[in-house]
Image: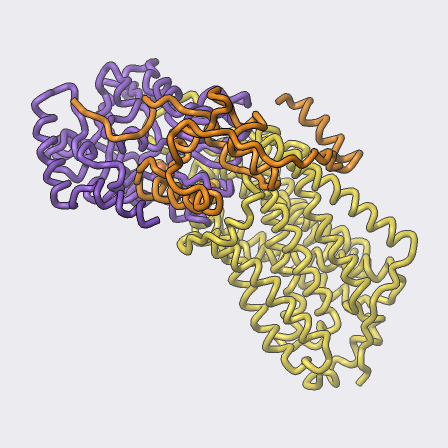
């Protein structure tokens, strides 16, 4: 980001007004990449409907109470799901597990403005560790 | 008794459209600035990790404070029963709402995450004066709305006084709340004083009256309606009193600080060697915002000059912005005293006066707020009957006595 | 959600067991001087939340802290993923910074790290409109960036300049310390490490061993013993915020 760049964008906005130029994409049924693990932390039907509540509940528990169980942690999700054909992908890739449905349903995901959208090295995981 | 007629303004003239277009341009500039700021983050503004509230807050707080003061004219009419001010009351309510909406818009668009406004509305920390202010601001709009309704719908006129008292109390609390945003900051020596709240109340009266004067004179001049000099003269003398009161409380504020040893640094900075802040204080706040308007309001020479009154009002507005700048920015640039008795240095300008240069985005965002207020008023008077058809002396003055007690 | 609760039940020891387990480890830690491990949290399973049995604190011995050394700052940057901002200096993020002092009349010099002091009565928490700025049961003051609206009132309220606003997009990557544009952040006492029984990164990094981390509520902990025996100082004690970070030798 440069000041010049920002200024140019600003002027463009001023002069032209803003145009939503998002071309309407072809709406194909989402192709959901397969997770790495055996099965998900809950039934697909539950996850499909409730993953946001589960994540939000976990988020509040972890953030405010320091409860760091892994079952519903976002990192856990990414470690299993952020792969396409066994290759790790980030949210920038439109085949990313979260992306496929969210784009299909046109629901914006906020999580990855801050959170990592790729699998994380296990060593960093906050799990009970064996202490010397 | 002659019942005053109110009517919408015609609003078809080229100059009216032109005026709206001008405001529209500023609105668009403000909107573009806000979008740019949101997209690139506050990196493109002059704000930083020492001066965390910048130009947008100067405008926002000014507008919010002025909003409360603009309602004063209506309060005089319905709370204190001065029927001379009654015809002036609807515009006063409209202005109050308009200024508040403008100020709030700026405040919200300057948030780091304006997209999370819904969070601000749904998560409340009731210990936070800021959270209370969110309630106070939205409540103010509602209360003034009801008040206007009682005032303008003839069958509810009987309730005007009750609604007026509610609005009056609400606005005092609101300004106290706004002042307390700063007053509660114990960490910062410039703010940590009980005088903050009363100072804000008096400032609000001065700013609000000044804006009211400019608005009503402009509205009547531009629409060719008659505006008697008695209205202007009364408001002008009010303005004079309020401006004098602001000067007085500012003097008290600085004199008390001079008694408190820990505050000597702040005082030396603002009053003597703070560079631009000292200049803004003496030239902007005291001279342009205080002494000059007083002279224009009180001196015989300007007694019958409408222009002088308009100029005085505009000076009060400019001086008010300068005062806000000195309070908000000046209070932040001073280093926080953590280690008395030591010279402090660090890579994060500990022990140094912080720098702040406002960016165009912040300026346009602030002016955008002013434009919103202007648009609300300009459109408001076109669609609803806020303005009496005539405020000629003959229409208001001779009837003061007979009008009292009735209605 | 019931399975989730179940998991919590089986994962956590009862509170009584849990406290005594902590005490046992505390004794062990004293036996290995130098490799002080703060004790109680080790006994904590991930399902056991933070509790007010603890109050985490930090004791900084300025006699040991070297002028010009900023190992703790680098360690913090690395651990928490800040410090590579592309913005003006005044806009750069500062979770921890080195401050150098020089006494007016004597010329005595002191160098120390400053960070969030984890106040027991944090003004940043009082002023926050949404409750994003909060104090955990164990005394660690954090920003919940999910609900921070970026109003920066907490920055105005903090007497220590401990908080930073993120002025630009963050190129992220760190799984355990997510950061984002438009929100405010500050030292977390490395809460993610503390929760698994480790010391904060700065404490680990200090070659002079100038920093001691531990539980102020545990009379057996090194930090509690030191603050009860030696003169230590809270910065701006006049404000009565009771910070959890204390300094020796200023
Ligand atoms: S040091 Fe500042 S940020 Fe940290 S708890 Fe105290 S007031 Fe809050
Ligand atoms: S910036 Fe965020 S954490 Fe700080 S007071 Fe505002 S909402 Fe709370």
B213 and B21: which is toward the camera: B21
Q: How is the image coloured?
A: by chain
* Count of marks placed on residues: 0
x then y, percent, for residue A54: 41, 44
Which residue is found at the position 84% from the left and 50% from the top?
B19
Res. C193 image quadrant: top left
x then y, percent, for residue C119: 30, 40
Work out which quarter of the rendered image holds the C terminus of chain C and state it: top left
> Which chain comes out yellow in the rendered image?
B
Which residue is found at the position 31% from the left and 29% from the top?
A126
**Residue B273, visible in the rendered structure:** no
Res. B100 image quadrant: bottom right
Colour displayed for chain A in the image of the structure:
orange
Quick check: C75 above or below B143? Answer: above
B7 and C13: which is toward the camera: C13
Quick check: B251 above or below A89? Answer: below
Which residue is found at the position 53% from the left and 55% from the top?
B134
B247 horizontally vs B83: left or right: left
**Residue B400, visible in the rendered structure:** yes
A2 and B355: which is toward the camera: A2
Which residue is found at the position 46% from the left and 45% from the top?
A45
> Which chain comes out purple in the rendered image?
C
x then y, percent, for residue B153: 72, 77
């Amino acid at each position: 980001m440069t000041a010049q760049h920002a200024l140019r964008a600003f002027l463009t906005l001023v002069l032209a007004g803003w145009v939503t130029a998002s071309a309407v994409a072809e709406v194909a049924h989402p192709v959901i990449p397969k997770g790495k693990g055996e099965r998900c932390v809950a039934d697909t039907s539950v996850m499909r409907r409730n993953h946001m509540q589960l994540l939000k509940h976990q988020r509040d528990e972890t953030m405010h109470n320091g409860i760091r169980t892994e079952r519903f942690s976002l990192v856990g999700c990414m470690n299993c799901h952020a792969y396409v054909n066994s290759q790790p992908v980030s949210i920038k890739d439109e085949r990313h597990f979260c992306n496929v449905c969210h784009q299909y349903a046109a629901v914006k995901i906020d999580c990855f403005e801050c959170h990592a959208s790729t699998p994380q090295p296990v060593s960093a995981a906050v799990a009970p560790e064996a202490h010397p | 008794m002659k019942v005053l007629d109110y009517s919408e303004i015609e609003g078809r003239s080229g100059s009216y459209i032109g005026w709206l277009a001008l405001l529209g341009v500023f609105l668009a500039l403000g909107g573009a600035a806000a979008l740019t700021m949101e997209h690139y983050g506050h990196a493109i503004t002059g704000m930083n990790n020492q001066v965390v509230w910048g130009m947008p807050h100067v405008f926002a707080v000014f507008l919010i404070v002025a909003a409360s003061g603009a309602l004063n004219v209506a309060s005089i009419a319905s709370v204190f029963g001065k029927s001379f001010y009654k015809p002036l009351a609807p515009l006063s309510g409209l202005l109050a709402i308009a200024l508040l909406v403008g100020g709030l818009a700026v405040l919200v668009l300057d948030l780091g995450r304006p997209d999370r406004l819904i969070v601000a509305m749904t998560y409340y920390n009731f210990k936070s004066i800021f959270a209370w202010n969110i309630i106070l601001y939205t409540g103010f709009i509602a209360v003034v709305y009801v008040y206007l309704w009682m005032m303008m719908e003839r069958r509810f006129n009987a309730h005007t006084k009750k609604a007026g008292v509610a609005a009056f109390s609400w606005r005092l609390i609101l300004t106290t709340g706004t002042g307390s945003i700063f007053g509660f900051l114990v960490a910062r020596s410039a703010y940590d004083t009980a005088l903050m709240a009363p100072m804000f109340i008096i400032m609000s009266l001065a700013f609000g009256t000044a804006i009211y004067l400019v608005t009503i004179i402009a509205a009547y001049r531009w629409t060719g309606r008659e505006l008697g000099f008695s209205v202007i003269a009364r408001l002008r003398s009010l303005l004079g009193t309020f401006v004098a009161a602001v000067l007085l409380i500012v003097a008290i504020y600085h004199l008390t600080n001079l008694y408190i040893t820990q505050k000597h640094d702040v005082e030396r900075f603002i009053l003597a060697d703070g560079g631009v802040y000292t200049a803004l204080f003496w030239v902007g706040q005291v001279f342009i915002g205080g002494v000059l308007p007083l002279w224009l309001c009180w001196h015989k020479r300007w007694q019958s000059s409408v222009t002088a009154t308009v100029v005085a009002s505009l000076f009060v507005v400019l001086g008010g912005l300068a005062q806000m700048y000195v309070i908000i920015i000046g209070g932040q640039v001073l280093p926080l005293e953590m280690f008395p008795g030591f010279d402090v240095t660090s890579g994060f300008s500990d022990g140094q006066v912080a720098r702040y240069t406002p960016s165009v985005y912040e300026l346009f965002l602030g002016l955008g707020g002013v434009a919103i207020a202007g648009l609300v008023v300009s459109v408001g008077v076109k669609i609803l009957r806020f303005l009496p058809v005539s405020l000629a002396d003959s229409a208001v003055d001779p009837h003061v006595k007979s009008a009292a007690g009735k209605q | 959600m019931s399975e989730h609760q179940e998991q919590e039940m089986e994962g956590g020891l009862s509170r009584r067991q849990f406290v005594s387990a902590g005490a046992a480890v505390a004794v062990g830690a004293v036996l290995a001087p130098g490799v002080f491990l703060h004790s109680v949290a080790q006994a904590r399973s991930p399902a056991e939340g933070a509790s007010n049995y603890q109050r985490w604190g930090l004791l900084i011995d300025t006699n040991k802290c070297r002028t010009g050394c900023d190992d703790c700052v680098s360690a913090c940057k690395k651990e928490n993923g800040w410090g590579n901002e592309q913005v003006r200096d005044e806009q750069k993020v500062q979770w921890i910074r080195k401050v150098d002092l020089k006494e007016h009349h004597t010329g005595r010099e002191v160098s120390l790290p400053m960070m969030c002091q984890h106040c027991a009565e944090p003004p940043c928490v009082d002023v926050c409109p949404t409750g994003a700025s909060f104090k955990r049961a164990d005394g660690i003051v954090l920003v919940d960036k999910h609900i921070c609206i970026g109003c920066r009132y907490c920055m105005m309220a903090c007497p220590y300049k401990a908080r930073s606003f993120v002025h630009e997009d963050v190129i992220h990557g760190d799984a355990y310390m997510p950061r984002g544009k438009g929100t405010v952040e500050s030292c977390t006492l490395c809460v993610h490490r503390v929760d698994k029984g480790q010391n904060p990164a700065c404490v680990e990094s200090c070659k002079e061993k100038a920093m001691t981390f531990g539980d102020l509520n545990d009379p057996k902990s090194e930090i509690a013993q030191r603050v009860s025996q030696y003169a230590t100082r809270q910065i701006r004690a006049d404000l009565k915020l009771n910070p959890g970070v204390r300094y020796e030798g200023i």
